[in-house]
Amino acid sequence: MTVVFDSSDRSEVARARQDLVEGAQRWALWSKLGWQDIRKRYRRSVLGPFWLTLSMAIQVACLGLIYGTLFKIELDGYLPFLAIGLATWTFIASTLNEGCATFIELEPLIKNVRIPMSVHILRILWRNLIIYCHNIVIFVGVAIVFGIWPGATALLAVGGLALLLINAFWIMLLLGMICTRFRDVPPIIGSLIQLLFFVTPVMWKPELLGERRFLMVLNPIHHLLELVRAPLLGIAPGWENWMVAILVAVAGWSFTFACFARFRKRIAYWL
């Protein structure tokens, strides 16, 4: 059995670092747990997680027709934009919402099995990534229908997705600790996510802001979303998208790691 990280001869920083390293090394554990969550949720279901895909496909079709008409945008350009944007936003919103309740929902496991705390975060992140991959099928279908071929530019989406996952990891870890300590925070986060949905260009294009398009620079979710969406549409993301995503990752991880090193051992007592 692997030696537990709570050793009295090491600092809290070293213990927190080992928690993250050991959590990453136990990929077989959290990937299997995440996949088991998917199978458990859709047990005895014919379509399984593809029910979510079907639901989103209907949503994309309906919203595409309605908002395409309202914004006077051609469907061949709007539907692919909406399909990948809505799928990516759903992934972001799900990770934030579930990140708030990660430690709370896994209370029995945390109190009875000594495994790195980061394993629980990676489990939820992997589970949502699987669902996200199912939803990407909608964009593939739309792209085929409208003849969209992004070419080599689509490879940039891999880097964008990597930055999205890196940022999602620290946000989930931070929210998990905060919401475990303060149980009134999850409803607040839920309300903020709803607000972010309307101020982030998911259903509308940034060009509609006209001269106020610069306001999008202040929205980090927009940059993370654009790093995945733009390459799949055959457009290279701007340097400001990469810069903001990287700066948010560095600053976020620095702050979150400091909090994790200080409060990691208290999580079990807060449950």
Image (cartoon, grey):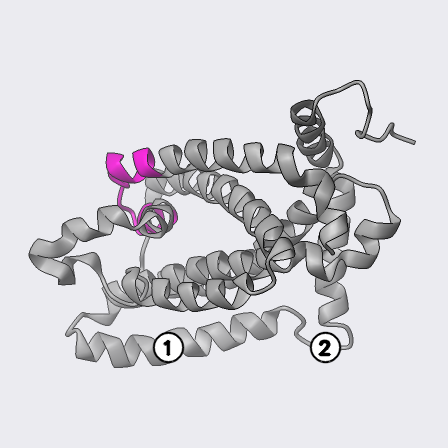
Give the vertical position of 151 relative to 3 (above or below): below
Q: Secondary structure at mark 2?
A: loop
Q: Amino acid at mark 1?
A: Ala
Give the vertical position of 65 relative to 32 (above or below): below
Q: Are marks 1 and 2 in contact (CB under 8 Å)?
A: no
Quarter of the view holding residue 134: bottom right
Instruction: Name the foreground residue: 22 vs 185.
Output: 185
Q: Residue extending furthest right? A: 1
Residue identifier under label 2: 45
Is 85 included in the stretch rendered in magenta?
Answer: no
Marked residue nearer the N-terminal end (1 or 2): 2
Predominant SS of the magenta segment? helix
Give the vertical position of 230 relative to 72 (above or below): above
Where residue 125 appears, as percent x and y from the top left, is: 61, 50
Residue 237 left/right relative to 269: left
Residue 200 left/right relative to 169: left
Q: Amino acid at mark 2?
A: Ser
Q: Which mark is residue 61?
A: 1
Instruction: Name the foreground residue: 101 vs 83.
Output: 101
Q: Quadrant of the C terminus?
A: bottom right
User: Whole-Å distance between the Cαs marked 1 and 2?
Assistant: 24 Å
Is residue 221 in view? Answer: yes
Tell me the magenta residue range. Answer: 228-244
Residue sitting at 28 percent across and 63 percent down? 199
Q: Secondary structure at mark 1?
A: helix
Is residue 127 in view? Answer: no
Residue 162 left/right relative to 209: right
Where residue 27 appears, as percent x and y from the top left, is: 72, 39
